[in-house]
Image (cartoon, helix red, strand yellow):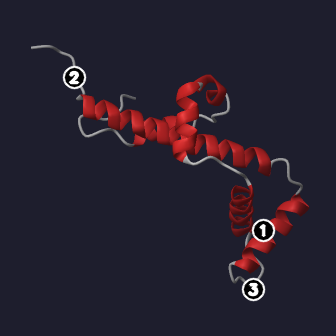
Amino acid sequence: MSDAGPEESPEGNRDRAERVLRAKYLDYCSSQIAGHLVLLSPDEIYVLAQEAHRAGGGESEPSYEQMVRSATEGVAQRLTLPTFEQWAEEYERDPARYDEQLLGLWESELEEAPGPEEGPSPT
């Protein structure tokens, strides 16, 4: 008997690769949105948040958290982000082009969601 853990099946490897790719896509989208948010002045964020809040039916003054969420959603809607399928195709052609833009958030996805044949991540 070997001391090594059970090997992952080809299907498990594909599932893990898909999870990693999807996590990297979400990381990429987050970095694009964050990059645009930091370029906005506080006044622009306020106006964007107010517009989104009122468009959503809000009448009272939004909280700071609601303003940040609304501004983030507003930026996300205004950006032309690729679909997952488009991004994955481009990523597979040139991963280095995208890897430098990732924030590293995708790595936590791997720690939080081990596959069915994987054990807990070592700490």
Q: Which residue is mark 3?
A: 59
- Earlier in the chain: of badge 1 and badge 2, it is 2
Residue sitting at x 58%, y 33%: 90
- Earlier in the chain: of badge 1 and badge 3, it is 1
Q: Decide which of 88, 34 is in the foreground and name it.
A: 88
Kind of residue sitting beneath label 3: Glu
Residue 99 visible: yes
- Earlier in the chain: of badge 3 and badge 2, it is 2
Q: Residues within 10 Å of mark 2 (few under 14, many from 20)?
A: few
Q: Which residue is mark 1?
A: 49
**Residue 104 % position (x, y):** 58, 34
Q: Residues within 10 Å of mark 3 (few under 14, many from 20)?
A: few
Residue sitting at x 21%, y 17%: 4
| Mark 1 secondary-structure assignment | helix
Q: Which residue is mark 2?
A: 5
**Residue 80 % position (x, y):** 70, 51
Position of residue 113 relative to residue 40, above or below, is above
Please give the label number shown on residue 91: none
Kind of residue sitting beneath label 2: Gly
